[in-house]
Image (spheres, rainbow, N blue to C red):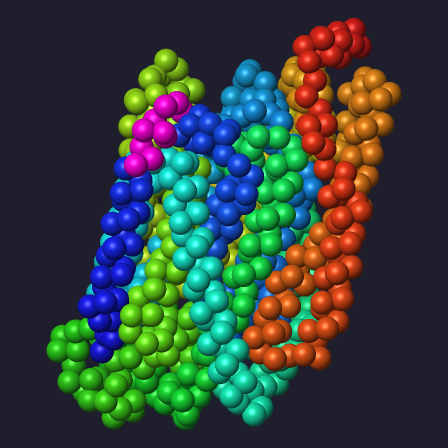
């Protein structure tokens, strides 16, 4: 069944060994200080941080999800991933989110709460709840990564999804614990090179495969049932298979997700890469480079999707075969539900002797002698499981040896995301909980040991969660729309409203997070749109009530925050205290940043769409998209790039700070 050969295994084993060696080599650098361990000592260059960001966002599980939608919809699958996979928040981080957070000189997003709200009750409450919310979000994200890794790897190795995940996550955990943020960035650089090689290989293969078919659009329609597969613009009504009906209103979903991205994007940027950046200019440059590098992901995924169309046509010329197979399994194994479907298929394929002879004989009769490989593509509803398209293409279409290299590409994507997520979350545990409340004078070595314990805790809890979810798309939708909706408004208000205080943030975040967990437990099948609306409303109401039920923050603390960060929004009492020159410079900066938003988002969306159109030879849509991309690039140049400062705009000295704080004191 399994077509990995000795060379494939040697390549994969060598890659794992190289990662562990690299982690050991970086251990001394990471252990110099807690700042070195979590943000690289603020010495890493912007291009390295940009590459690291790309590797962080390019995860295996997300790549499988997006490939599944591209397989179902063609290039229009991009619009469903407005919810998160298209990374539209990068535009806001490039223009202002990154530099606003960097100016704090903090190490973690939770520590930033003390900078914003002060070190009193409100600030500490906000810091603790932010750390708790960060841990919950990380557990959800890690579970999503673990679930995807299991689904992917079980296509290639004769083990269950659980044990496949254990091996991959085990290696990643070791080098992340040892090397900290240095390990994140340097392994990301190493992995980015591998990812680029894989992108080129898959893109060239897919381009050639599509070129060899007279009417690829007709073939895609016959396989997927989608009559507009080659189209690039979203439609109000789109054909979707069983299990994906909620995405039929594609245009509405795209607009809804776009609105969500704007609301959540404005306050984004609390990322270790920005806390570790050297200045404002490099925050912008690293994000622009990050976005550009993300464009290489899309032709690779489109390539997998296009080759998946050809593969399914060859392997399942009769779609009734899929319905018959799913029906037989449900009849013979009536206890199997959707959450455990992939594990059951893997177990049947790996250990057929442990199952009824009638089941195995039936599978052989329906699918033929190579039923074990075909079985992995069968979905719970009786169609193709689109989340398995990517590994199936590797299994069927890629020759031995090269398959091992491309497996490493996807492993690199998964591991780079996992290690960055773990590194960021252990910062909450170590810096914002242990050092803050349990042992303020802890040594660097002690804090690193605590972070190691935190890694183990996170991984164990995430494994438990991972194998209770139905699909990777299911948990991703909840992370972005459910949990993201509950946390969205408190995160926004902390940056745009001067009266918003630590108590309001903590209460709004805690209630929104709790409501999201409750929704996941009691109403797991709630439509993603209603998740965002309901949980967003709950978080909003709780934030406002919490703000007025608790005492306002110290005005001197708020004044210092505003003077250093310079965000736009509702800051009237503090904005008028700035000198005319500072206020004019700040307003000019804000005006340019906001005017650049549509151009930055246009550039990003078209930058991702263009290479996909090339892969599927959709030339009639390619040229208009290229023109729009150029328009976006020109707007970015005039409104943003040419105004990037060589030095930071605002690095106020103590004299300015004392002057402003005196004015605040006199007014109060």
From the viewer's side, name the closer residue of 660 and 462.
660
Screen quadrant of the C terminus:
top right
When asked about the image quadrant of residue 375, the answer is bottom left
Main SS, magenta region, reads: helix
Residue 656 x %, y %: 74, 12
Residue 15 x %, y %: 29, 54
From the viewer's side, name the closer residue of 284 and 246.
284
Asked whether, in this view, residue 287 is left or right of residue 351, the answer is right
Residue found 65% across the figure and 32% down from its top:
280
Residue found 53% across the figure and 89% down from its top:
213
Residue 567 x %, y %: 72, 31
Residue 372 x %, y %: 25, 80
| Magenta extent | 25-34
Screen quadrant of the N terminus:
bottom left
When asked about the image quadrant of residue 360, the answer is bottom left
Asked whether, in this view, residue 349 is left or right of residue 559, the answer is left
Would you place residue 455 above or below residue 666 in this image? below
Residue found 42% across the figure and 74% down from its top:
389
The tally of labels here is 0
Would you place residue 58 above or below residue 24 in this image? below
Residue found 33% across the figure and 70% down from its top:
403
Would you place residue 524 above or below residue 331 in this image? above
Asked if residue 147 can be seen in this view, the reply is no
Is residue 29 within the magenta segment?
yes
Would you place residue 317 above or below residue 74 in this image? below
Is residue 501 within the magenta segment?
no
Asked if residue 619 can be seen in this view, the reply is yes
């Amino acid at each position: 069944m399994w077509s990995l050969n000795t060379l494939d295994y040697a390549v994969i084993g060598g890659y794992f060994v190289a990662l562990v060696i690299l982690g050991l080599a970086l251990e001394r650098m990471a252990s110099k200080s807690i700042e070195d361990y979590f943000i690289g000592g603020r010495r890493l260059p912007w291009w390295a941080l940009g590459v690291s960001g790309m590797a962080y966002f390019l995860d295996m599980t997300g790549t499988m999800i997006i490939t599944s939608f591209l397989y179902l919809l063609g290039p229009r699958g991009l619009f469903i991933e407005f919810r998160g996979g298209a990374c539209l928040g990068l535009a806001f981080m490039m223009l202002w989110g990154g530099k606003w957070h960097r100016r704090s000189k903090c190490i973690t997003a939770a520590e930033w709460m003390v900078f914003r709200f002060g070190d009193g009750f409100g600030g500490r409450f906000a810091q603790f709840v932010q750390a708790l919310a960060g841990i919950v979000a990380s557990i959800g994200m890690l579970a999503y990564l673990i679930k995807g890794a299991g689904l992917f790897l079980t296509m290639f190795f004769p083990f269950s999804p659980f044990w496949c995940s254990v091996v991959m996550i085990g290696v990643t955990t070791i080098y992340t614990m040892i090397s900290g943020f240095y390990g994140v960035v340097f392994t990301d650089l190493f992995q980015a090179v591998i990812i680029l090689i894989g992108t080129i290989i898959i893109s060239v293969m897919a381009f050639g495969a599509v070129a060899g078919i007279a009417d690829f659009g007709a073939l895609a329609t016959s396989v997927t049932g989608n009559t507009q597969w080659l189209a690039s613009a979203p439609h109000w009504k789109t054909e979707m298979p069983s299990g994906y009906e909620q995405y039929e209103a594609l245009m509405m979903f795209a607009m809804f997700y776009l609105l969500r991205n704007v609301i959540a994007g404005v306050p984004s940027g609390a990322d270790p890469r920005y806390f570790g950046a050297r200045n404002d200019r490099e925050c912008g440059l690293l994000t622009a480079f990050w976005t550009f590098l993300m464009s290489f992901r899309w032709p690779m995924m489109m390539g997998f999707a296009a080759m998946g169309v050809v593969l399914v046509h060859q392997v399942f010329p009769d779609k009734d075969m899929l319905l018959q197979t799913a029906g037989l399994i449900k009849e013979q194994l009536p206890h199997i539900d959707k959450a455990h479907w992939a594990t059951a298929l893997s177990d049947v394929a790996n250990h057929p002797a442990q199952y009824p002879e009638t089941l195995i004989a039936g599978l052989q009769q329906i699918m033929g002698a190579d039923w074990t490989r075909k079985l992995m593509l069968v979905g719970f509803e009786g169609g193709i499981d689109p989340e398995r398209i990517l590994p199936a293409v590797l299994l069927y279409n890629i020759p031995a040896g090269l398959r091992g290299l491309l497996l490493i590409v996807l492993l690199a994507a998964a591991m780079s995301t996992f290690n960055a997520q773990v590194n960021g979350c252990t910062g909450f545990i170590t810096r914002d909980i242990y050092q803050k409340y349990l042992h303020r004078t802890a040594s660097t070595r002690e804090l690193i040991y605590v972070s190691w314990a935190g890694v183990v805790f996170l991984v164990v809890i995430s494994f438990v969660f991972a194998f209770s979810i139905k699909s990777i798309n299911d948990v991703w939708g909840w992370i972005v729309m459910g949990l993201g909706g509950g946390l969205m408004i408190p995160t926004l208000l902390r940056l745009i409203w001067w009266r918003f205080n630590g108590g309001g943030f903590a209460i709004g975040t805690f209630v929104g997070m709790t409501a999201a967990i409750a929704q996941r437990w009691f109403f797991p099948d709630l439509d993603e749109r209603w998740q965002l609306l309901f949980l967003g409303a709950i978080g909003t109401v709780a934030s406002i009530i919490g703000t007025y039920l608790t005492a306002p923050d110290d005005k001197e603390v708020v004044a210092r925050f505003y003077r250093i960060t310079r965000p736009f929004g509702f800051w009237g009492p503090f904005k008028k205290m700035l000198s005319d020159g500072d206020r004019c410079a700040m307003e000019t900066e804000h005006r340019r940043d906001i005017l650049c938003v549509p151009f930055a988002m246009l550039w990003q969306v078209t930058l991702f769409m263009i290479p996909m159109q090339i892969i599927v030879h959709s030339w009639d849509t390619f040229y208009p998209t290229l023109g729009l991309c150029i328009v976006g690039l020109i707007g970015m140049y005039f409104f943003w790039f040419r105004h990037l400062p060589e030095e930071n705009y605002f690095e106020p000295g103590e004299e300015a700070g004392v002057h402003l704080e005196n004015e605040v004191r006199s007014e109060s």
